[in-house]
Image (cartoon, rainbow, N blue to C red):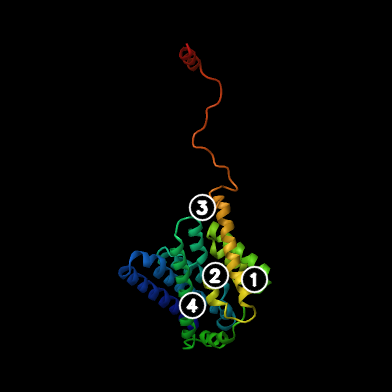
C-alpha cells in the first residue's frame, strides 16, 4: 500500500505542477505561443510522466505490490478524466496535430511548432521521471530504477504486425476516442501508444529493436491510421485535394419531379400566348 500511495502522490504532484505551469504560461505568454507551444509541451509532459509511472504499476505492481487489474483499470480511467479536464484543449499527440493540418484547420508553422513542443515535453518528462525513480521513495521505484538502465522493448511482435496494430489503434482513436478499449486490446502487442511523441520518450531508447523499426511501428503506423480515419470520415484531405473519393456530394437544391398541376399548365399556356 505504501508503494501505491507514492505513485498516487506522484500522479497528483505531476498534474498539479503542470496545471500551475499551464496557468502561468497562459497568463504571461502571447496567445499564439501558449496554444502552439506551451500548452502542447505541458500536456505531453503530463501525459508521458503519468504513462511512465502507470507502466511501473502495471508491470511490477501485480507481483511486487499485489495490485489487481481492477485497481489498474480504475487508475487508467481516472487519469484519462484528469487529462481531459486539465489539458485545456491540448492534444499532446503529433497525429492529432497532423490531422488538424490535413483538415486545413492549422497552418504548417503552427503544426510543426506543436509537434516539436510535444516531443520536447515528453522527453523532458521522461528524464525527470527517471530522476524521481532514483530517489527510491518506494519499493516499486527502487526496482524500476534498477530495471530502467537496461529496459526492454515494448514491441512484442513483428515490425509489420506492430505497425498494423498501432495504425489500427490510431484509426479507431481518431474515429471513436475510446482509449481504454484500445489499451486493453492492443497493449500486449505494442503497448498501444498510438502517440509518436509518447512512444519516443518511453521505448525508443530501449534495446530489442532498431530506431528504424521503432519509427515504422510507432510513427508511420499511427500516421497512416490517422490518414485513413480522415479519409473515411471526410472522403478527402482538404489540405491536399477537394475531390471526394468515397461520398457523392448532393446539391443543395433538388429539381422537382412529377406532373404539373392544372394551374401551372394554364399559366405556362397563357405565357406562351
Does any portion of residue 187 appear in the rendered image? Answer: no
**Residue hosting label 4:** 123
- The answer to which of marks 4 and 2 sits earlier in the sequence is 4
Task: Look at the picture and state if 132 lies above or below 115.
Answer: below
Image coordinates of residue 107 in percent, x first then y, are 44, 60
Kind of element beneath mark 2: helix
Q: Is 142 or 43 nearer to us in this picture?
A: 43
- The answer to which of marks 3 and 2 sits earlier in the sequence is 2
Instruction: Tell me how far mark 4 sits from mark 3, CA to CA.
Output: 32 Å
**In this rendering, which labeled residue sits more in front, label 4 or label 1?**
4
**Residue hosting label 1:** 189
**Residue hosting label 3:** 238
- The answer to which of marks 4 and 3 sits earlier in the sequence is 4
Does any portion of residue 41 appear in the rendered image? Answer: yes
Instruction: Tell me how far mark 4 sits from mark 1, CA to CA.
Output: 23 Å
Q: Residue at 44% x, 79% y: name it.
A: 10
Kind of element beneath mark 3: loop
Instruction: Tell me how far mark 2 sits from mark 1, CA to CA.
Output: 16 Å
Kind of element beneath mark 1: helix
Q: Is residue 224 left or right of residue 21?
A: right
Image coordinates of residue 33 in percent, x first then y, are 37, 67
**In this rendering, which labeled residue sits more in front, label 3 or label 2?**
3
**Residue hosting label 2:** 196
Instruction: Tell me how far mark 4 sits from mark 2, CA to CA.
Output: 12 Å
**Residue placed furthest toward the left:** 28
Amino acid at each position: 500500500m505504501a508503494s501505491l500511495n507514492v505513485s498516487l502522490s506522484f500522479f497528483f504532484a505531476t498534474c498539479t505542477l503542470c496545471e500551475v505551469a499551464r496557468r502561468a504560461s497562459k497568463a504571461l505568454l502571447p496567445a499564439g505561443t501558449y496554444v502552439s507551444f506551451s500548452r502542447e509541451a505541458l500536456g505531453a509532459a503530463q501525459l508521458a510522466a503519468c504513462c511512465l509511472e502507470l507502466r511501473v504499476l502495471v508491470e511490477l505492481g501485480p507481483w511486487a505490490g499485489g495490485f489487481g487489474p481492477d485497481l489498474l483499470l480504475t487508475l487508467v480511467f481516472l487519469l484519462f478524466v484528469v487529462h481531459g479536464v486539465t489539458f485545456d484543449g491540448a492534444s499532446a499527440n503529433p497525429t492529432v496535430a497532423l490531422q488538424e493540418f490535413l483538415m486545413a484547420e492549422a497552418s504548417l508553422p503552427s503544426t510543426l511548432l506543436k509537434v516539436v513542443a510535444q516531443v520536447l515535453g515528453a522527453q523532458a518528462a521522461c528524464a525527470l521521471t527517471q530522476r524521481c525513480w532514483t530517489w527510491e521513495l518506494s519499493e516499486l521505484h527502487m526496482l524500476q530504477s534498477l530495471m530502467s538502465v537496461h529496459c526492454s522493448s515494448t514491441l512484442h511482435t513483428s515490425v509489420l504486425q506492430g505497425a498494423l496494430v498501432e495504425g489500427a489503434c490510431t484509426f479507431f482513436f481518431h474515429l471513436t476516442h475510446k482509449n481504454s478499449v484500445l489499451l486493453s486490446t492492443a497493449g500486449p502487442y505494442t503497448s498501444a501508444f498510438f502517440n509518436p511523441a509518447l512512444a519516443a520518450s518511453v521505448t525508443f531508447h530501449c534495446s530489442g529493436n532498431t530506431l528504424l523499426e521503432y519509427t515504422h511501428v510507432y510513427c508511420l503506423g499511427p500516421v497512416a491510421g490517422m490518414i485513413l480515419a480522415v479519409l473515411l470520415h471526410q472522403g478527402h484531405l482538404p489540405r491536399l485535394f477537394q475531390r471526394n473519393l468515397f461520398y457523392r456530394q448532393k446539391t443543395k437544391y433538388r429539381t422537382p419531379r412529377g406532373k404539373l398541376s392544372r394551374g401551372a399548365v394554364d399559366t405556362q399556356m397563357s405565357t406562351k400566348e
